[in-house]
Image: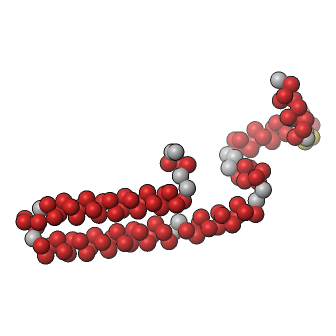
Amino acid sequence: MGFCEMTDNELRISALGVIWGAYTVIMVASLAAAETIGSGMILVLAVLLAMVALSGTRIAWRYSAPWSLAEAEKAKRLSKVEQFMQHLSDQELDELRSRLTDGADGEMVSLDEVLAERRRR
């Protein structure tokens, strides 16, 4: 599964993994250098980094949830054809329009006619 194919929850989980993974790596590195840094400085570093990680977690959950809820509600209301049409690019929509119009006069062709012609090929 590519990056663009990930769901909202998978993206949130990935973001949280990066945030808390970075926190863990930095804390392990600072604990390894505890003798040179000092225990008081490690405590300050841990608190500051925890605040940053918690803020990042809050942002990842807060700003992605309303969009995904709105999309879920919208998807419930739309038919499969409407959902398909929403994901077409402008170029793909133009191509679809040209296939559905009957040549020079611009008259619309039925979908059945287009499908029948495609089967003949």
Q: Nearer the viewer, residue 89 or 15?
A: 15
Residue 49 is situated, as x and y percent measured from the top left of the image, at 28, 70
Q: Position of residue 61 (x, y in %)?
A: 48, 69
Q: Is 108 or 111 nearer to us in this picture?
A: 111
Q: Is residue 89 left or right of residue 1?
A: right
> Residue lying furthest left in this view?
35
**Which of the image's four quarters has the C terminus?**
top right
Q: Quadrant of residue 91?
A: top right
Res 29 visible: yes
Query: Of 84 and 94, which appears nearest the observer?
Result: 84
- Residue at image x 29%, y 64%? 23
Residue plotted at (76% across, 52% down): 80
Residue 64 lies, with reference to residue 90, above or below; the image says: below
Residue 105 location, x and y as percent?
92, 37
Up-down relation of residue 118 to residue 35 (above or below): above
User: Could you say which quadrant of the image residue 77 lies in?
Assistant: bottom right
- Could you tell me which residue is drawn at 75 percent across and 42 percent down? 94
- Residue 102 visible within the image: no
- Residue 37's spot in the image, x, y percent? 10, 67
Q: Residue at x 50, y 48 (%)?
A: 3
**Left or right, 119 with reference to 9:** right
